[in-house]
Amino acid sequence: MNIHYANFIISAVSPKQYPSTQYPEIALAGRSNVGKSSFINKLINRKNLARTSSKPGKTQTLNFYDIEHLFYFVDVPGYGYAKVSKTERAKWGKMLEDYFTQRHTLKKVFLLMDFRHDPTTEDVQMKEFVEYYNIPYQIIATKIDKIPRSKWNKHESAFRKKLNLSSTQPILLFSAETGEGKDAAWDSIQKAIQDGEISE
Ligand SMILES: Nc1nc2c(ncn2[C@@H]2O[C@H](COP(=O)(O)OP(=O)(O)OP(=O)(O)O)[C@@H](O)[C@H]2O)c(=O)[nH]1
Ligand SMILES: [Mg+2]
């Protein structure tokens, strides 16, 4: 996919701030520092449209990016950042629950998880959360360039076990560094945003 137009639209914390133009949406969720912003930038070939953060946990809003006037990427603030207070955490939970329950244009959630480590308890909870709300999702293992190819199978098995995935459920292996997995990610997006429509 060749992207000509990609633009940051709005930071939102509550439904009334979501963009009113109704494009299908793909949300990126995952722990802080997992590579959500880098994923967006790599897919659209921009260095820094989605701000990659030096301070993890700093972004506390849903950031909407218009891609080609075709769909939105929604960069969801990361979880698992220890220095966030209980109040902040509760606000974050409410923001996500509002978003998942009220945003009917949401087509799929990409759940990003660091391929180097076993999924965390919060990763597992996030997966259960989207399953609970019946939202289609895709597990994306990030930073695969940091793991030698010979160990990929081992890491993938660990993911399957921890996340309790069926053997047919795909894990998309991705690197924002090398671009590996980019085509598969675009395929997944295209399937999701065409959902229910007759493609021409
Ligand atoms: N080697 C490697 N580094 C990556 C990859 N993806 C992201 N990074 C690095 O990981 C760090 C965090 O990336 P971000 O994209 O800012 O992570 P994020 O999930 O958006 O983080 P928050 O916005 O804090 O939730 C940056 O230093 C990136 O350069 C990858 O695929 N490979
Ligand atoms: Mg980010």
Image (cartoon, helix red, strand yellow):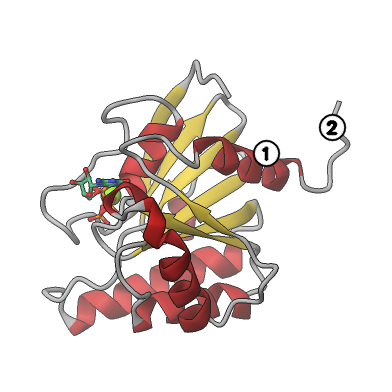
Q: Which amino acid does label 2 sit on?
A: Ser
> What residue is drawn where x is 62% and y is 30%?
70
Residue 167, above or below 34 = below
- To which residue does mark 2 refer? 199
- Are the residues flagged by discs 1 and 2 in contact, CB closer than 8 Å? no
User: Of residues 126 and 174, which is closer to you in this image?
Assistant: 174
Residue 55 at least partly seen: yes
Label number found at residue 63: none
Task: State which quadrant residue 31 falls in.
Answer: bottom left
Q: Mark 2 Cα within 10 Å, few/some/many (few <14, many 20+)?
A: few
User: Of residues 39 and 23, which is closer to you in this image?
Assistant: 39
- Would you say the beta carbon of the disc 1 residue lies within 8 angstroms of ligand 1? no
Split into 4 quadrants, where in the image is the N terminus?
top right
Secondary structure of the residue carrying numbered label 1:
helix
Secondary structure of the residue carrying numbered label 2:
loop
Across and down, in percent, residue 90 comes to 30, 80
Across and down, in percent, residue 110 comes to 51, 56
Residue 9 at least partly seen: no
Across and down, in percent, residue 4 comes to 50, 15
> What residue is drawn where x is 31% and y is 55%?
147
Extreme residue in the top direction: 4
Q: Which amino acid does label 1 sit on?
A: Gln
Residue 55, above or below 116 = above
Q: Mark 1 Cα within 10 Å, few/some/many (few <14, many 20+)?
A: few
Across and down, in percent, residue 111 comes to 47, 62
> What residue is drawn where x is 38% and y is 33%?
42
Split into 4 quadrants, where in the image is the C terminus?
top right
- To which residue does mark 1 refer? 190
Task: Give left or right: position of 27 versus 75.
Answer: right
User: Of residues 170 and 36, which is closer to you in this image?
Assistant: 170
Task: State which quadrant residue 138 falls in.
Answer: bottom right
Per the model, the C-alpha gap separating discs 1 and 2 is 10 Å
